[in-house]
Image: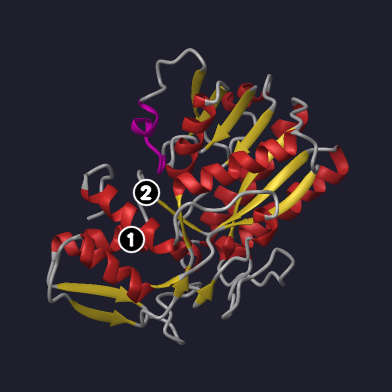
């Protein structure tokens, strides 16, 4: 099989490349290296089954489109993942997510690629409340990031109906693990390395999230890819998350414990009404993964285990932490 992985030098994309290469695929990686790094692909860069295209998906006729000429499946993982910039730089998410996705779809149409795996997000739901959110729940994104992902989903579904493109849309929870370079776990480790006596927390700390370890996320992705290629469905949407969730303050506790710190003072910065950390932040979101589990998949790590494993990876120095 031949696959194209957009954003393949990034966090999630590079782990997917690992899985595909280990499964014997021929893989073409497309990445502009704005947030990804070739170091994430160091194991494969000289391998004859891997090719790398440094290109920008916002350029519709760029050299990167050649990677689609023989592809069986496109794995569209490229996006700008920083939800916090939605309120100050909304054009970034429109361009990096919506425009780039349209160009990917057009390249797939021109070269008659038959299948697409799309990395969507739990952000399409907005506020989730105190119960797990199923795939058919109302979509009310509270950030431009979430809105851009939802727009991409709608365009992909239209390409499925109009051009016969088979597709799986994966609404990922908070995916964490080795090579992660943003998000609450990375933020907490970086802050505590600078000042092990105080931890500044955005919001009131009661925000709740599910966390899924990256190997579980890739396992679910490959599981659904097989189902798609086996003809179990031609278009479906799946939540990809965990069976539990954690508050931000619980994440802080785990990080402090794993770093072996004592007497850390917490300082809360409530930058938005309702105890949120920023405009576009979500108080509670927990994905219902019953649909995915019905196909025979389940996560190996719960949320706390995923956070602990991620902190240990960060402390081993596998990721360059932000200043």
CA separation in Å, label 1 and label 2:
9 Å
Kindly identify which residue carries mark 2: 180
Q: Would you identify the image quadrant in which residue 187 lies?
A: bottom left
Seen as rendered, the residue at the extreme right is 162
- The image shows residue 206 at horizontal and vertical percentages of 40, 81
Q: Crowding at label 1, few (<14), some or many (≥20) Cα neighbours within 10 Å?
A: many
Mark 1 or mark 2: which comes first in sequence? Answer: 2
Q: What range is drawn magenta here?
A: 34-42
Number of labels in the image equals 2
- Describe the element under mark 1 as helix, strand or loop: helix
- The image shows residue 208 at horizontal and vertical percentages of 46, 74
Which residue does the image show at 74% across and 33% down from the upper left? 229
Answer yes or no: is residue 78 visible.
no
Quarter holding the C terminus is: bottom left
Kindly identify which residue carries mark 1: 185
Q: Is residue 230 above or below residue 203?
A: above
Q: Are marks 1 and 2 in contact (CB under 8 Å)?
A: yes
């Amino acid at each position: 099989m031949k696959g194209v992985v957009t954003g393949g030098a990034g966090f999630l994309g590079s782990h997917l490349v690992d899985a595909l290469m280990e499964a014997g695929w021929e893989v073409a990686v497309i990445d502009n290296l704005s947030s990804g790094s070739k170091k994430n692909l160091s194991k494969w860069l000289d391998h004859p089954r891997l090719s790398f295209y440094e290109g920008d998906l916002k350029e519709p006729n760029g050299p990167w489109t050649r990677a689609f000429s023989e592809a069986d499946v496109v794995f569209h993982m490229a996006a700008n993942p920083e939800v916090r910039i939605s309120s100050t730089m909304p054009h970034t998410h429109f361009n990096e997510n919506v425009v780039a996705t349209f160009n990917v779809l057009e390249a797939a149409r021109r070269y008659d690629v038959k299948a697409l795996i799309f990395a969507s997000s739990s952000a399409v739901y907005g506020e989730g409340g105190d119960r797990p959110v199923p795939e058919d729940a109302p979509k009310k994104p509270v950030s431009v990031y979430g809105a851009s992902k939802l727009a991409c989903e709608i365009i992909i579904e239209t390409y499925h109906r109009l051009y016969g493109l088979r597709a799986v849309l994966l609404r990922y929870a908070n995916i964490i693990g080795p090579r992660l370079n943003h998000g609450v776990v990375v933020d907490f480790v970086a802050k505590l390395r600078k000042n092990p006596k105080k931890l500044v927390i955005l919001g009131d700390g009661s925000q709740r999230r599910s966390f899924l370890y990256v190997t579980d996320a890739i396992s679910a992705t490959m599981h659904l890819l097989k189902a798609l290629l086996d003809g179990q469905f031609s278009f479906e949407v799946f939540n990809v998350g965990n069976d539990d969730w954690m508050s931000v303050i619980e994440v802080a506790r785990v990080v402090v414990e794993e770093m072996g710190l004592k007497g850390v003072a917490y300082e809360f910065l409530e930058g938005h009404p309702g105890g949120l950390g920023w405009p576009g932040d979500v108080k509670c979101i927990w994905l219902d993964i019953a649909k995915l589990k019905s196909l025979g998949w389940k996560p190996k790590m719960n949320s706390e285990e995923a956070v602990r494993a991620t902190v240990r990876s960060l402390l081993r120095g596998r990721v360059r932490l932000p200043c």
